[in-house]
């Protein structure tokens, strides 16, 4: 698929658009993604922050301190609870939960992040890239 593409929450209260192709698609095994997904990881699409825009609604932010010591804001739909995206102030990247795309079937998984936090029952494809934490220079 080519940009632009769109997505949003389950109930339709929040919508977004992305005007650039994803830079990467990864399974993130950090504990925050485990909480947000209710499972072993979240599949995320990394896009340029400048290419990402909320077009409808007002997502609810939840800010935590990442392992880098910087704040990370995870946004979700306050009505239906769908986790939508993550941003770090000043970062050139936005991290979109892949399942929130209108059509996520075209995404191609590139690897796994935070494998050091992966649950023993969570499969990590050994043929793809793996990072114990966040790759250098990515956050």
Image (cartoon, grey):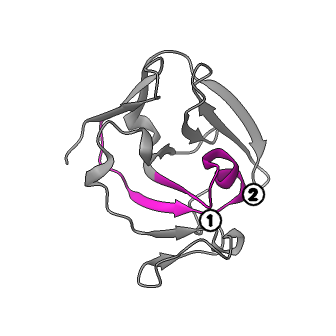
Residue at the image point whose x is 43% and y is 44% from the top: 99
Assign a secondary structure to mark 2.
loop
- Identify the residue under disc 1: 134
Vertical relation: 89 (above or below) 131 = above
> Residue 118 is drawn in which quadrant?
bottom right
Whole-percent x, y for residue 98 in the image: 43, 47
Q: Nearer the viewer, residue 103 or 39?
A: 39
Vertical relation: 1 (above or below) 89 = below
Residue at the image point whose x is 77% and y is 42% from the top: 64
Assign a secondary structure to mark 1.
loop
Judge the density around disc 2: few (<14), some (14-19), many (≥20) Cα neighbours within 10 Å: few
Residue at the image point whose x is 58% and y is 41% from the top: 86
Judge the density around disc 1: few (<14), some (14-19), many (≥20) Cα neighbours within 10 Å: some
Does the magenta segment cover residue 133? Answer: no
Magenta segment: 18-44
- Identify the residue under disc 2: 68
Residue at the image point whose x is 49% and y is 45% from the top: 97
From the image, which quarter does the C terminus lie in? bottom right
Does the magenta segment cover residue 42? Answer: yes
- Please say if the residues under marks 2 and 1 sit with CB atoms less than 8 Å apart: yes
Vertical relation: 60 (above or below) 45 = above
Whole-percent x, y for residue 39 in the image: 62, 56
Marks 2 and 1, how far apart at CA? 9 Å
Q: How many marks?
A: 2
Q: Is residue 34 left or right of residue 135?
A: right
The answer to which of marks 2 and 1 sits earlier in the sequence is 2
Q: Which mark is residue 97?
A: none
Whole-percent x, y for residue 120 in the image: 67, 76
């Amino acid at each position: 698929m080519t940009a632009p593409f769109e997505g949003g929450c389950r109930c339709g209260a929040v919508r977004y658009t992305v005007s650039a192709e994803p830079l990467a698609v990864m399974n993130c095994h950090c504990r925050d993604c485990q909480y947000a997904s209710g499972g072993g990881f979240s599949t995320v699409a990394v896009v340029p922050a400048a290419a990402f825009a909320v077009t409808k609604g007002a997502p609810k932010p939840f800010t935590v301190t990442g392992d880098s010591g910087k704040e990370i804001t995870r946004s979700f739909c306050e009505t239906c609870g769908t986790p939508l995206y993550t941003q770090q102030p000043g970062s050139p990247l936005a991290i979109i939960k892949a399942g929130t795309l209108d059509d996520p079937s075209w995404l191609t998984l590139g690897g796994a992040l935070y494998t050091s936090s992966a649950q023993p029952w969570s499969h990590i494809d050994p043929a793809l890239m793996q990072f114990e934490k966040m790759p250098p220079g990515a956050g």
